[in-house]
């Protein structure tokens, strides 16, 4: 029985539902209690799409704003390419592609007390750029200290387990 061999050095093309991460807001889960999430497409110009394909983006300061029935991401940084014929503005507002019912849910959620809409990550899915939009509530300082304590305790426990298995029975 013959098997089909792949080309040496060839890359596998991602499937329609496979995700390839571009950028992540690593502080999002530390600074905010994340709630409901939505997946949104983004309206881009050509040089922005090429820049994102190179993995250049920063969503650490990005948030979503709902204005006149449209969702916009603001504060997302996509650096322009040096060799692009027509560049783009680095921190411009970009329109999000969502269903009207999702936009209404985002608007209602953002109007609640201490709630905001943040962008935890941006990724490719089936060749298209997608944003994850999360409804979030800002944590207080004591919540952050508690999260640090829990993380440290978990790291110490993991370390103790590893050292016990390393030097334990053979």
Image: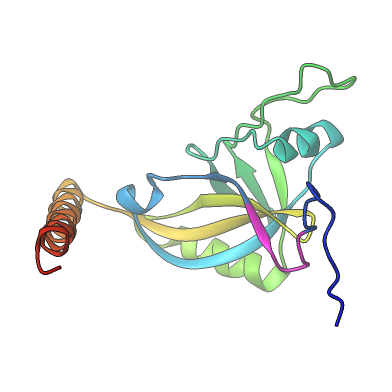
Q: Nearer the viewer, residue 170 or 59?
A: 170
The residue shown at (79%, 42%) is 44
Residue at the far right in the pictured view: 85
Q: Is residue 61 visible?
A: yes
* Percent of width and height locating residue 29: 36, 54
Left or right placement of residue 106 versus residue 170 in this view:
right
The residue shown at (80%, 58%) is 13
- Quarter holding the C terminus is bottom left
Residue at the far top in the pictured view: 82
* Percent of width and height locating residue 159: 16, 55
As drawn, 142 above or below 81:
below
As drawn, 4 above or below 27:
below
Quarter residue 76 falls in: top right
Q: Nearer the viewer, residue 58 or 11?
A: 11
Left or right placement of residue 15 versus residue 66 in this view:
right
Q: Is residue 67 visible?
A: no
Q: Nearer the viewer, residue 90 or 6?
A: 6
The residue shown at (48%, 38%) is 60
Quarter residue 106 falls in: bottom right
Does residue 97 belong to the magenta stretch?
no
Kindly report the secondary structure that dominates the magenta region of the rendered protein: loop
* Percent of width and height locating residue 147: 20, 54
Does residue 16 belong to the magenta stretch?
yes
- Quarter holding the N terminus is bottom right
Left or right placement of residue 40 versus residue 138 in this view:
right
Left or right placement of residue 119 versus residue 124 in this view:
left
The residue shown at (74%, 32%) is 51
* Percent of width and height locating residue 169: 10, 69
> Which residues are drawn in magenta?
14-20
């Amino acid at each position: 029985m013959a098997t089909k061999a792949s080309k040496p050095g060839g890359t596998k093309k991602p499937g329609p539902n496979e995700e390839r991460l571009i950028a992540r807001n690593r502080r999002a889960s530390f600074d905010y209690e994340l709630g409901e999430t939505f997946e949104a497409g983004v309206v881009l110009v050509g040089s922005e799409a090429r820049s994102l394909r190179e993995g250049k983006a920063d969503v650490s300061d990005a948030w979503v704003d709902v204005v006149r029935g449209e969702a916009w991401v603001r504060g997302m940084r996509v650096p322009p390419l040096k060799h692009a014929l027509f560049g783009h503005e680095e921190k411009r507002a970009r329109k999000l592609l969502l269903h009207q019912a999702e936009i209404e849910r985002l608007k209602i959620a953002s109007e609640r007390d201490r709630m905001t809409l943040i962008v935890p990550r941006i990724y490719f899915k089936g060749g298209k750029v997608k944003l994850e939009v999360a409804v979030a509530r800002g944590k207080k300082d004591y919540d952050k200290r508690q999260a640090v304590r829990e993380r440290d305790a978990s790291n110490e426990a993991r370390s103790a387990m590893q050292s016990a298995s390393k030097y334990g029975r053979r």
